[in-house]
Image (cartoon, rainbow, N blue to C red):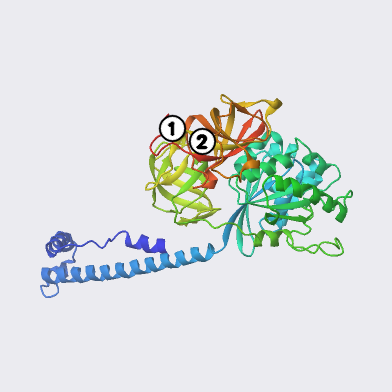
């Protein structure tokens, strides 16, 4: 209706004109009008309207047109208000990003596909098509994973490579599923998925031998949990999948065995017991996912199903009025430049003027898409696609940050960090000159440790600071150490102090395909400077 009103108004804008202009306009129009009059009407002076009457008619027409335009403007405003109300109604549901993590073949994509099927996002016909495709490849049990694994390489190998994205809703929440790859070769892709997540679903296979493979040293279950904690996934749902497998048959002993092994490990990774929930499921057939498992199938489980746990999980509130921070994870051209990312702080509206950092380009927001819907406004926590004017697609790199002009994010070439060394390759020593790959929000950048500032002794953390002796700078540290160090990167990057914006201040260091350290940014160079003043 709004568009209709605009279309009708467009040819007659309600411009303000004085009487003189009206008279001029009427005289210009009068001459052709007299030429086309019928001869009979022209000879009869009484029937022909005088120029003064003609002006009055035109003036009255013009006034009625202005009135009509005002009415239509009011209608358009009313329509916009209704649409805004509709948008508010629609967005009453909170939005959460859920990342599926775990060892390769634990059933992450199958569980994600089953969730979409159970929530009505995929119809029966599509499922039948996938079943036939999987059968043709002699992989009957993979058909649910095809919902999440959309490219041919993933389907042939049965391994997720990219981070799959999909949306579903429960009673109170809108969810975005991030299906992370489990294979160790694709851990960098998993990091990019987990860095956008609010909660994690750790999928563990209960099948005999599969849990042990994922949990042993070098298994992805361990690395994924440590990375998830580092990347800010505060709450974890541990789903013990494949409970219907012939080697398990919904055995309580197997469930308890896995839980007893995982709890100490999760605790050592930084997860409190209250932030972790265990539940048994079957991702392939959908048992204990949307509805609780029947007693005839599993008589010992009295807890909730997966949808109930997801719907009731509590996450910390975000600040919609804070300074805008949106790390760009991807960009493409579509009748203009479109960027994708998750709003970590603040809000974005259509028409906003913003800044792309670190190249300080002024841009204007043309349209905003949230999930698949066009919206006028998006708040923190939302995954959005934003069309921008004022910048070309080739001038944007993943890791750039969309920020407010009044309070832009800083760009730095070095920073101080508190690092925990997890496992150095070949028992190497960690010293100044050590090189690694830095993963921080959407940034992947080569870095070098230029200075070890202080080693933190966690055992003596609570001693009296007055009695504390000044520490000598360490020359090197080994596995398990916690150290404050200075890190330098080749290109300017946009990051924040962990204490100000946790999501933009936590990172991992990887080398030769392994995560060697996790850390947080503790100090940045002074504002306006990219490096520390020595």
Considering the image in quadrants, where does the N terminus appear?
bottom left
Examine the rendering and report whether any part of residue 427 can be seen.
yes
| View extreme (top): residue | 433
Q: Are marks 1 and 2 in contact (CB under 8 Å)?
A: yes
The image's mark for residue 18 is none
Q: Is residue 327 left or right of residue 306?
A: left
SS for dot 2: strand
Res 281 → quadrant: bottom right
**Chain-order first, disc 1 or disc 2:** 2
Q: Which residue is mark 2?
A: 416
**Residue at the limit of the structure toward the front, as seen here:** 467
Q: Which numbered disc covers residue 532?
A: 1
Viewed as shown, does residue 526 lie left or right of 339?
left
Q: Residue at x 85, y 62 (%)?
A: 300
Tell me the CA gap for discs 1 and 2: 9 Å
Q: How many marks?
A: 2
User: Few, some or many C-alpha atoms within 10 Å of disc 1 (few <14, some 14-19, many ≥20)?
Assistant: some
Q: Nearer the viewer, residue 71 or 374?
A: 374
Report helix, strand or loop for mark 1. Answer: loop
């Amino acid at each position: 209706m709004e568009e209709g009103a605009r279309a009708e108004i467009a040819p007659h804008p309600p411009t303000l004109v004085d009487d003189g202009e009206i008279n001029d306009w009427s005289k210009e129009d009068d001459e052709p009008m007299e030429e086309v009059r019928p001869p009979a009407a022209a000879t009869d002076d009484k029937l022909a309207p005088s120029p003064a009457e003609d002006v009055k008619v035109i003036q009255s027409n013009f006034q009625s047109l202005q009135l009509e335009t005002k009415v239509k403007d009011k209608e358009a405003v009313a329509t916009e208000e209704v649409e805004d109300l509709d948008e508010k109604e629609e967005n009453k549901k909170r939005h959460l990003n859920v990342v599926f993590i775990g060892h390769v073949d634990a059933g992450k994509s199958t569980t994600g596909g089953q969730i979409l099927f159970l929530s009505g996002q995929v119809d029966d016909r599509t499922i039948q098509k996938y079943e036939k495709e999987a059968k043709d490849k002699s992989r009957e049990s993979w058909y649910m994973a095809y919902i999440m694994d959309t490219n041919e390489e993933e389907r042939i190998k049965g391994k997720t490579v990219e981070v799959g994205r999909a949306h579903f809703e429960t009673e109170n929440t809108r969810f975005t599923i991030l299906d992370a790859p489990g294979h160790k070769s694709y851990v960098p892709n998993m990091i990019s998925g987990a860095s956008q997540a609010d909660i994690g679903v750790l999928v563990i296979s209960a099948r005999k031998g599969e849990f042990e493979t994922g949990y042993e040293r070098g298994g992805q279950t361990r690395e994924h949990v440590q990375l998830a904690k580092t990347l800010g996934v505060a709450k974890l749902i541990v789903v013990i999948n494949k409970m219907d497998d012939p080697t398990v048959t919904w055995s309580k002993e197997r469930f308890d065995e896995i839980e007893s092994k995982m709890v100490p490990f999760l605790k050592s990774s930084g997860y409190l017991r209250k932030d972790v929930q265990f539940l048994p499921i079957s991702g392939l057939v959908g048992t204990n996912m949307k509805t609780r498992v029947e007693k005839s199938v599993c008589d010992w489980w009295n807890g909730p199903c997966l949808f109930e746990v997801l719907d009731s999980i509590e996450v910390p509130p975000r600040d919609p009025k804070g300074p805008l921070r949106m790390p760009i994870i991807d960009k493409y051209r579509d009748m203009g430049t479109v960027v994708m990312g998750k709003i970590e702080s603040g809000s974005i509206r259509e028409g906003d003027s913003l800044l792309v950092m670190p190249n300080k380009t002024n841009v204007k927001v043309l349209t905003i898409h949230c999930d698949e819907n066009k919206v006028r406004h998006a708040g923190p926590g939302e995954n959005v696609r934003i069309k921008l004017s004022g910048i070309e697609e080739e001038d944007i790199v993943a890791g750039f940050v969309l920020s407010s002009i009044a309070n832009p994010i800083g760009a730095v070439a070095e920073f101080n960090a508190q690092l925990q060394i997890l496992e150095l390759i070949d028992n190497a020593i960690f010293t100044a000159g050590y090189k690694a790959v830095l993963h921080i929000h959407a940034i992947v950048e080569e870095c070098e440790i230029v200075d070890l500032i202080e080693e933190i002794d966690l055992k003596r953390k609570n001693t009296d600071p007055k009695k504390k002796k000044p520490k000598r700078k360490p020359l090197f540290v080994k596995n398990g150490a916690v150290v404050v160090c200075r890190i330098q990167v080749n290109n300017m990057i946009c990051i924040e102090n962990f204490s100000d914006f946790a999501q933009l201040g936590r990172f991992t260091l990887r080398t030769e395909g392994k995560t060697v350290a996790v850390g947080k940014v503790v100090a940045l160079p002074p504002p306006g400077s990219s490096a520390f003043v020595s």
